[in-house]
Each structure stands twice: as structure tokens, then as C-alpha cells.
Image: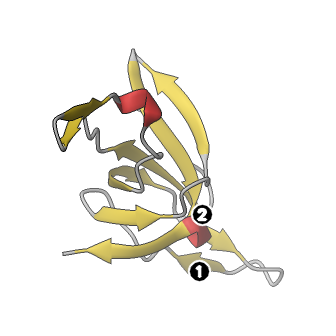
Amino acid sequence: MLKPLADRVIVQVEETGEQQVGGIVIAQASEQKPVTGKVVAAGPGRVTDAGQTVAMTVKAGDTVLFDKFAGQAIEVDGQDYLALHEKDVIGILD
């Protein structure tokens, strides 16, 4: 499994699939990028200039809302993920 460093978060993006709007099928490729996903791994936290580690707010299992164009798409063992900085996470969804 991938272990992120510092304040990085690995997110499995929720797939939206096809949607039907007014009888028109909108393909997934033409939709906007999803902005929610499930955290599968989180780093230990950000290290300050003083050398102290600031703990992460999010943890594995959280469903998060994140900036639309944030992160780096990665593939691990054939599975697609998004690597984000914790600052790109807007909030945790309950």
C-alpha cells in the first residue's frame, strides 16, 4: 500500500458514472471533475520550521470534499487515486 509523506492525503475519487438529464445521457468524460472521495491513506502531518509535526485533520476512511483542480492523479496496482495536500481538502462529509 502507498504511504503518503508529510501532509499528503491519498483519495479514491467517487465515480459518478453516466447521468441522464431530460432524456439526454451525459457521458462521464464530459462531466466536471468529481470533488468528493474517500481517504485511503494520510501522512503523519506537516513539519513546521521549528521541526514540530502538526497532526493531520483527516484520516483513512473519511469522505472528503476537495478543490476541483487539486492534486495529482496516480495509479497504484491498477487502481486510480488522487494525491492531495491536506490544505486542498475543503471539509469532511458526515
Residue corresponding to mark 1: 54
> Residue 10 at x, y = what percent?
46, 47
Q: Residues within 10 Å of mark 1 (few under 14, many from 20)?
A: few
> Residue 91 at x, y = what percent?
40, 76
**Dot 1: element:** strand
Q: Residue at x 40, y 16 (%)?
A: 77
Is the Cβ of the residue at disc 1 closer than 8 Å to that at disc 2?
Answer: yes
Q: Amino acid at mark 1?
A: Val
Foreground disc of the pair 1, 2: 2
Residue corresponding to mark 2: 7
Residues 28 and 85: in front is 28
Q: Residue furthest front?
A: 22
> Residue 19 at x, y = what percent?
22, 38
Q: Residue at x 18, y 44 (%)?
A: 22
Q: Residue at x 34, y 28 (%)?
A: 27
Of the image marks 1 and 2, the number of the one nearer the N terminus: 2
> Residue 92 at x, y = what percent?
33, 74
Q: Residue at x 29, y 44 (%)?
A: 14
Q: Amino acid at mark 2?
A: Asp
Q: Is residue 81 visible?
A: yes
Image vertical order of residue 79 relative to residue 50, above or below: above
